[in-house]
Amino acid sequence: MSKKPYYITTAIAYTSGKPHIGNTYEIVLADAIARFKRKEGYDVRFQTGTDEHGQKIELKAEEAGVSPKEFVDQTAGEIKRIWDLMNTSYDKFIRTTDPDHEKQVQKIFKKLYDQGDIYKGYYEGMYCTPCESFFTESQLVDGKCPDCGRPCQPAKEEAYFFKMSKYADRLIQYINEHPEFIQPESRKNEMMNNFLLPGLQDLCVSRTSFSWGIPVDFDPKHVVYVWLDALTNYITGLGYDVDGDNDALFEKYWPADLHLIGKDIIRFHTIYWPIFLMALDLPLPKQVFGHPWLLQGDGKMSKSKGNVIYADDMADMFGVDAVRYFVLHEMPFENDGVITWELIVERMNSDLANTLGNLVNRTISMSNKYFGGVVANCGVTDGFDKDLITVALSTKHNVIRKMEKLRVADAMTEIFNLFKRCNKYIDETMPWALAKDPEKKERLSTVLYNLVESITIGASLLAPFMPETAQRIFKQLNSSERTMDELEMFGLYKSGNKVVEKPEILFARLDVKEVLAKVEEMYASRAQAEGAEDAEEEPVIDIEAKPEITFEEFEKMQFQVGEIISCDAVKKSKKLLCSQVKIGSQVKQIVSGIKAHYTPEEMVGKKVMVLVNLKPAKLAGVLSEGMILCTEDENGELSLMVPEKKMPAGAEIC
């Protein structure tokens, strides 16, 4: 019986620089899902790669004094090195500069042009270089890019356009009929309400103002614009051919089961990409999951700040599997996750060194101390055994249920709940006490057997997430990874096997002060290598001064700490969020123009600075009873004003 195919992809990484840990999270997440699907018996195809064309690359190559191809060769090599370092099991690493991909993109463009979906026109509007996106004046938020908040520049050029509106109704119907297509649910609502239902504008799909791209073969002064080039990698990487001469891989694996992408590019994958596929008369992917971001705890990662965390630095300090554990376990399903060096050490010590590492070490040490390493099931049981066995056998089903919903962090929690139950079992049975009574020797042997068996089950489920650690556990226990079918049974460990004589420490406890000292040293070395020491001071901003006010006028303003308890987008606005803010014992409704900088989910739980006694006013028809204060940098990026220390809601700001 042949295995059921399963095709999973990541977004292809943009070759503008070395990926930080937030970028690396996606490939590790995809790898965990791919490995788990293989364990479930699927025939998995796992594709990743690099997006290598565009104006930004052309500019960066020019700054570096190399050709664009030399620049992307170097950067793509660095990205692939990081992916390999993180032990990711991809089957295909595609590059958009691959000749077979470029050839198919040209053929796709021509086909869409010939059938009337693409037409030549003239573009005049606002262009965001970092996002490589065009916008009309009405789409800008406070005159800035609605996606990244940076300034846009006027652009005017001849271009080809795709008739998006031709397929909009069909896509709306598809999304309504396939509720699982866009996940999480909040992403689907955002796409429908903010983009599809208001109406789609035709999409610019070629450029003439730069040359680093795939030429339109019948009009070579144009290059194919980034999204039509990049998105098609999901089919060209399987050997799709416009003329119908498809590779067997395409016939086997398309449509994709899962496109795993960052939430910032959900629009391109759930609107542009499905419409391109409809125009090509191809099935749509079964699901697009827009995962949240992994954010630096003390603010956004920035090279200028010198606080960027890279996966290879983390791996050098903690080991690859520890990094995999952290990014997979600490990322919530919908909201952004937070990474700090202190939190990594805390998880290392509590979860990996204590819960897992100490459990394996104690079990092997006791087996050697009391039975010369021999693990035998003597069948002498009591009430504690039943609950342990129940937890061990139910863990598989709990993990599968979580993974079916892509709740990877929750799945890992289920596995570690089993390890915690094993530790509790040791406390309940007290092997050291049993060892003092010769008549309880067989009971002691059974206890240790149950522990080895339970750890083997847990390690078998852990293997897709922490593959190296699982294999190290199997080697020490003289066991092997169980199949999913074998995880239905308890007692498969061969009675009479011997564990290793000296257990290996899986994860050593760390001193947070020592780790932070190493981090400081690492950042200092990096800054020196990058020439950051030449920067005398951080940039400052001068703004136009407002008229002076008296102290009496200032005293009329009441500032307090407010806690945001809920937040929603204002339906009639592209830039407004409506927050319910707890201030002392009362709750105020405050409308803020920060939608381009914060999602409603990101707002909830934050403590912010509030101007409480601002006269109420209606914004887009919604009553606002105060003002949440923010700060703005030279690029128009907004940041909420939050208290440095923990403060209660309602605390006066004076």
Image (cartoon, helix red, strand yellow):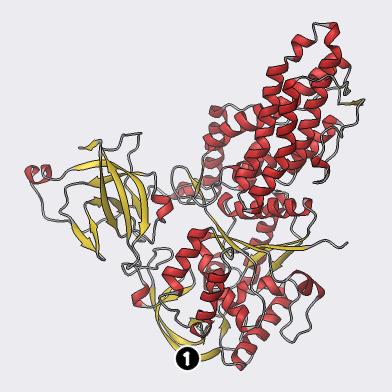
* Residue 506 image point, x, y percent: 73, 31
Q: In which quarter of the image is residue 198?
A: bottom left
Front one among 208 and 605: 605
Q: Residue at x 53, y 58 (%)?
A: 184
For residue 396, above or below residue 255? above
Front one among 429 and 613: 429
Residue found at the far right of this picture? 496
Q: In which quarter of the image is residue 190?
A: bottom left
Q: Which amino acid does label 1 sit on?
A: Gly
**Secondary structure at numbered mark 1:** strand
Residue 538 located left or right of residue 96: left
Residue 281 located left or right of residue 135: right
Q: Which residue is drawn at 85% across and 7% down?
A: 439
Front one among 13 and 513: 13
Residue 423 in view here: yes
Q: Quadrant of residue 284?
A: bottom right
Residue 130 in view here: no
Dot 1 crowding, Cα within 10 Å, few <14, some 14–19, many 20+:
few
* Image quarter of the N terminus: bottom right
Badge 1 is on which residue? Answer: 121
For residue 167, above or below residue 248? below
